[in-house]
Amino acid sequence: MGFSDDQIKLLREIINGGVVRAGDILNEMVDSKIKLEIPKLNIFEGKSISNTKELKESGISSIVRLDFSGSIEGSSLLVFPYQSAMKFVSGLTGEDAGSEGFGMLLEEAVTEIGNIVLNNVMGSITNAINCTVNYEVPIFKNEEISEILKMEIANFKTSILKAETKFYIEEIQVEGEIFVFLNYEATNEILLIQTSK
């Protein structure tokens, strides 16, 4: 099992299509102009999963998790470093990060953004492999990303898709990451559809 350079390039295009659609939806919801892009996609398989740099990092991140099941199973995460999440939500809402109630606002905003982004990314992937999945309710946490990743890797050991994501709001740029954790069946389905392209 393994992804060729052409397969990684195609998968990046598929994921980027979902991210662009998510950006369009977010633009309809807020006054600020939002642009999203995926400059880089990494795929970790087998033993290389332990090389994911976030496993070695400390610090709190704002994380939205969206589990999926059906024809394929796995989970997906949208991750912002906590300071970046505050910057993003403040720029999006105009609220000061130190204001009363900002923590609840941050949770609601990041959860909604994560739900939109992850649904559209997974929609692009499942459309490409012609399968149907069911989504759980998204879960928000402020937690160390290393601890979350260790838990996810224990559940879905086969492959991790890691898409570095840039969010632009007018003059503000915030970087986040999208992780998709796949079991063997899901990975094999993606390999098969891309091989046939």
Image (cartoon, rainbow, N blue to C red):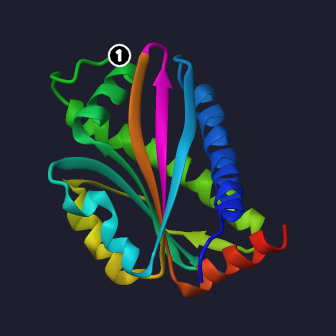
Per the image, the residue denoted by label 1 is 94
Residues 16 and 95: in front is 16
> Can residue 67 be found in the magenta stretch?
no
Instruction: Give how far across and how far down residue 4 sits, in percent.
Output: 66, 68
Q: Quadrant of the N terminus?
A: bottom right
105, above or below 132, in the image: above
63, above or below 33, in the image: below
Q: Which residues are magenta?
A: 161-171
Please state if 163 lies on the left or on the right of 16 as rendered. Answer: left
Q: Quadrant of the C terminus?
A: bottom right
Can residue 125 be seen here? The reply is yes
Res. 132 image quadrant: bottom right
Q: Residue at x 17, y 21 (%)?
A: 99
Res. 6 image quadrant: bottom right
Q: Residue furthest right?
A: 197
> Can residue 163 be found in the magenta stretch?
yes
Please state if 68 lies on the left or on the right of 8 as rendered. Answer: left
